[in-house]
Image (spheres, rainbow, N blue to C red):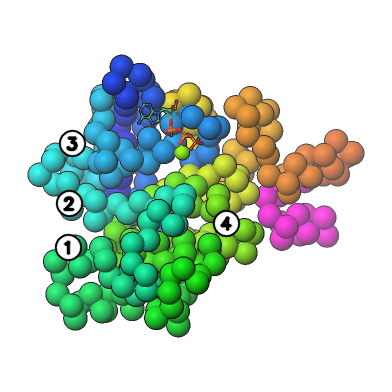
Amino acid sequence: MSIEVKNLSFSYEDNPILDDVSFCVKSGEFVGIAGPNGSGKSTLAKCLNGIFSPTKGEVFVDGISVKDRSKQWIIRQTVGLVFQNPDNQLVASVVEEDVAFGPENLGIPPSIIRERVQYALERVGLINERKRLVATLSGGQKQRVAIAGILAMRPKYIVLDEPTSMLDPVGRKEVLSTVLQLKEEGVGIVYITHHLEELVYADKIMLLYKGRIFKEGSARDILTDEDTLKKIGLDIPEIPALALRLKKFDVAFDNIPLTIEEMVNAILD
Ligand SMILES: Nc1ncnc2c1ncn2[C@@H]1O[C@H](COP(=O)(O)OP(=O)(O)OP(=O)(O)O)[C@@H](O)[C@H]1O
Ligand SMILES: [Mg+2]
């Protein structure tokens, strides 16, 4: 079971935005996508659940083409999308009502909705806030309510388009650890970000540049490749940047570390 993107091209009117993009996201896999402004990341996100239909090529969700309009609803439920600004995604004033909104629209019976709301709020660590007014939550909590709203639809994949860019560091950590936990539970994750340090736990990373995949590889391949990142205007994360500088002073590393823990272990070794 996977989202399979095959030679996907997409144009707005005559304006080509995505060009021959291919990749695959399996259950329980965390795929990171990074690229500079205007490289086509959000457009790609919207192609993954059929909001946009490929101009050329295909996107298959568990074998169903997103071009098949008769399967639109099942595809939208299977692939949930989380956007940048939680305020634009939340519709109800009370947390649990907001989370119930999606399943209510699917016509799911109330007893099952209650179970789903409970499940989703537990997953994002907000079960004790279920009666709170959305307006009183922090940015990170709001984004987690938005994720809970998606989870209540029981998606198999979640695509997050810069979900932390409007959040403070605490909110960022909350959202990221929620996403990593979902991966552990078998949800396929596509995580789009400018903050490359958020991708250290990705199973693979794709760099998007001018609508094409510029490079793809493991987190270590991509996040330590300073030259490639520089070429497309992205900043290497702090820990690998520090390691590469230390290397110039003859500090030896078997592997360039990505996290503080790896850095500490490498130095103490
Ligand atoms: N509705 C639209 N009609 C025409 N062109 C569009 C539309 N939306 C986006 N574009 C263009 O498509 C290109 C890719 O936009 P997209 O939003 O996918 O990039 P992005 O990588 O998500 O950028 P950002 O980092 O700023 O979010 C840009 O050149 C943009 O101007
Ligand atoms: Mg975008």
Percent of width and height locating residue 12: 32, 24
Label at residue 67: 3
Query: Do callouts 4 and 1 mark residues in contact (Cβ within 8 Å)?
Result: no
Image quadrant where residue 183 sits: bottom left
The three-letter code of the residue at mark 2 reads Trp
Outermost residue toward the left? 70
Label at residue 73: 2
Q: Camera-side residue: 61 or 34?
A: 34
| Residue bearing the label numbered 4 | 167
Query: Do callouts 1 and 2 mark residues in contact (Cβ within 8 Å)?
Result: yes
Q: Looking at the image, tell me whether mark 4 or mark 3 is earlier in sequence order.
A: 3
Q: Is residue 40 magenta?
A: no
Does 93 appear above or below 200? below
| Residue bearing the label numbered 1 | 106
Q: CA distance from mark 4 to mark 3?
A: 34 Å
SS at mark 1? Answer: loop
Give left or right: position of 138 versus 51: right
Which residues make up the magenta segment?
253-269
Q: Nearer the viewer, mark 4 or mark 3?
A: 4
Query: Do callouts 2 and 4 mark residues in contact (Cβ within 8 Å)?
Result: no
The three-letter code of the residue at mark 1 reads Leu
